Image (spheres, grey):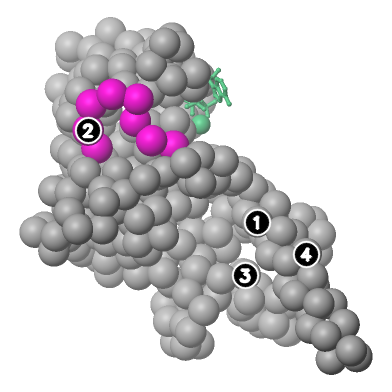
Amino acid sequence: MENTLMMISAVFNMFVRARASSERIGEVFSQESSMRWDRHSVKSADIKGRVDFENVAFSYEGVSGEPVIKNINLTCMPGGTIGIIGSTGSGKSRLVSLIPRFYDVTSGSLKVNGEDVRNIEPKKIREKIAVVPQKTVLFTGTVIDNIRWGKEDATVEEIERAAMIAEAHGFISAYPEGYQIKVGQGGINFSGGQKQRIAIARALVKNSEILILDDSTSAVDVATETKIKNSLKKYVRDLTCIIIAQRITTVMDADKIVVLDDGEIVGIGKHDELIKCCKVYQEIVKSQVGKEM
Ligand SMILES: Nc1ncnc2c1ncn2[C@@H]1O[C@H](COP(=O)(O)OP(=O)(O)OP(=O)(O)O)[C@@H](O)[C@H]1O
Ligand SMILES: [Mg+2]
């Protein structure tokens, strides 16, 4: 009897902890239970890290609702950096949230490594992808625990390497406690930019095929941001990197910049091309000249 009660209490504790962590994660995978995948159709990946959007549309209320994203045709290749820019509410976060199946497309097809993601178990697809969400979520514990959350069995070397690329190693090592420094509730003892860099290190330690940064350097100064981008290029060569930004300077040197407006792509190209022919891009540049540039 005593044993049974202990078991029940242990299971209950696990449940409460699991629930608390899922709340901490911030993203509620509300659609997951209704998501289907066909186990038999999963084939081995051809090109690691390739992402294809084919006529993708998404609306919150299903097929009948007004789409927040529509007519999306886009290919992201490993080794390249894709920048996504557009005004607030233009659909940037929603677009990338389709890749790890936080939401599923309403119509069209989204493929990762040539495979429609709807045929892949959400857990499996998320192993390939690291996302730094727009809102940084740190939990109470040490910095090393926070970074290790990206990969449970990460070694100290792996963690330090990720933190170096994310330009976080310097400020973390400056604490007497180093990586054992405690993170207060909601990361209160760190600045916005420091929190973002810890979150980037967490994503990098995962060593994924696809890395998505959703406005993840918005609180980091431009010089530090440039260092992070350069390190990413140097150390993580075959990664598919998708960077969402509000600032032109963040995406300016991307291999391909996607301009979103009201849920649609209104321009794809390099900075030099877009500045000549994409009106929305020109307007964004104009509004930011003299601020950060
Ligand atoms: N849960 C929701 N239900 C219905 N509509 C939503 C929901 N979340 C977002 N939207 C709408 O979807 C559109 C796209 O939102 P999204 O978050 O992708 O914009 P964004 O480009 O990332 O903006 P920001 O730069 O502010 O982060 C917006 O018009 C928004 O109002
Ligand atoms: Mg967003």
Marks 4 and 1 sit apart, C-alpha to C-alpha, by 10 Å
Of mark 4 and mark 1, the one earlier in the sequence is 4
Instruction: State the image quarter where residue 79 is shown.
Output: bottom left
Q: Which residue is under mark 4?
A: 16
**Rounded to the nearest whole Å, what is the CA distance between mark 3 and mark 1?**
15 Å
Q: In terms of sequence position, does the residue under pointer 4 or pointer 3 come before the other?
A: 4
Crowding at label 2, few (<14), some or many (≥20) Cα neighbours within 10 Å? some
Residue 105 magenta: yes
The first of marks 1 and 2 along the sequence is: 1
State the residue position of label 1: 22
Q: Answer whether labels 3 and 2 touch (C-beta < 8 Å).
A: no
* 80 vs 17: above or below: above
Q: Residue at x 56, y 71 (%)?
A: 149
For the residues labelled 4 and 2, the Cα–Cα distance comes to 37 Å
Of marks 4 and 3, the one in the foreground: 4
Q: Nearer the viewer, mark 4 or mark 1?
A: 4
Instruction: Name which of mark 3 and mark 1 comes first in the sequence.
Output: 1
Q: Residue at x 69, y 82 (%)?
A: 180
Residue identified by numbered label 3: 146
Label 4 sits on what residue type? Val
Q: Residue furthest left?
A: 46
Residue 285, visible in the rendered structure: no
> Looking at the picture, which amino acid does disc 1 mark?
Ser
Q: Give the alpha-carbon distance from disc 4 to disc 3, as whole Å.
A: 20 Å
Q: Given contact means CB atoms under 8 Å apart, are the residues at marks 4 and 2 in contact?
A: no
Tell me the crowding category of disc 1: few under 14, some 14 to 19, or many 20 or more residues within 10 angstroms, Cα based.
few
Residue 33 is at least partly visible in this image: yes
What residue does disc 2 label? 109
